Image: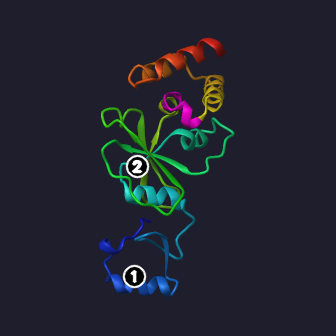
């Protein structure tokens, strides 16, 4: 099930608003509606994907999705290509701007559970390398522990280094951490 926006609604805008007032539609964000009987959906992911089709789950939220951290994100970390306007959202979404030239590197599309909409998700390797690049935001201990867990599960350091050579400011701190923990 896709989120409905008043501009794209088959019914008139006033009928959509009236349906919301009568309880037939749930408002999940400014201008985004779902049928009241829709299955449980992560509204943050749905709003991010609706506002920006190229939205991609990244950093701490991606680490948590891969179960590589014990830290619980207080907001959904979402990347978008640099140069785009940050959308206004009502959900707990933290928008990050990544270089457009490397934005699609390690990016996959996943289905938002309970919905027919997709959202991007960076691979575990790309996520770890991004966390090293932005370690002042994520926290060095969090990314170090995630790297240890990823290696314990059978990850290869060469896979991380392949991403680190393509992304700025990640190679040196990743290499230092790999020397210490391996």
Which residue appears at 65% of the width and 37% of the height? 69
**Element assignment for label 1:** helix
Determine which quarter of the picture holds residue 140.
top right
Q: Name the residue carrying label 2.
A: 55
**Element assignment for label 2:** loop
Tell me, for residue 130, which label it has, or none: none
Q: Position of residue 28 (x, y in %)?
A: 49, 69
Determine which quarter of the picture holds residue 56.
top left
Q: Position of residue 43 (x, y in %)?
A: 52, 62
Quadrant assignment for the C terminus = top right
Q: Is residue 152 above or below residue 17?
A: above
User: Callout 2 environment at 10 Å: few (<14), some (14 to 19), or many (20+)?
Assistant: many
Which residue appears at 57% of the width and 51% of the height? 75
Q: Position of residue 153 (x, y in %)?
A: 64, 26
Measure the alpha-carbon separation of dots 2 and 1. Answer: 26 Å
Q: Is residue 23 left or right of residue 106?
A: right
Quadrant assignment for the N terminus = bottom left
Q: Residue furthest front?
A: 136
Say if residue 71 shows up in the picture: yes
Q: Name the residue carrying label 1.
A: 16
Magenta stretch containing residue 130, yes or no? yes
Q: Is residue 41 above or below residue 69?
A: below
Q: Nearer the viewer, residue 64 or 140?
A: 140
Magenta span: predominant SS is helix
Magenta stretch containing residue 42, yes or no? no
User: Callout 1 environment at 10 Å: few (<14), some (14 to 19), or many (20+)?
Assistant: some
Q: Which residues are magenta?
A: 128-138
Q: Is residue 121 above or below residue 93?
A: above
């Amino acid at each position: 099930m896709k989120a409905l926006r008043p501009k794209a609604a088959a019914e008139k805008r006033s009928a959509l608003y009236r349906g919301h007032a009568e309880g037939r539609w749930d408002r999940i964000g400014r201008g985004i509606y779902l049928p009241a009987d829709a299955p449980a959906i992560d509204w943050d992911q749905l709003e991010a994907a609706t506002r920006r089709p190229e939205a991609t789950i990244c950093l701490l939220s991606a680490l948590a999705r891969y179960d590589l951290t014990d830290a619980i994100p207080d907001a959904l970390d979402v990347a978008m290509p640099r140069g785009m306007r940050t959308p206004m959202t009502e959900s707990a979404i933290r928008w990050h701007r990544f270089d457009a030239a490397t934005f699609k590197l390690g990016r996959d599309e996943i289905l938002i559970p309970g919905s027919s909409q997709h959202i991007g998700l960076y691979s575990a390797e790309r996520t770890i390398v991004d966390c090293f690049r932005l370690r002042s935001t994520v926290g060095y201990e969090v990314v170090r522990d995630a790297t240890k867990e990823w290696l314990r599960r059978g990850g290869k350091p060469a896979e991380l280094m392949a991403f680190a050579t393509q992304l700025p400011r990640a190679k040196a701190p990743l290499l230092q951490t790999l020397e210490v923990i391996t």
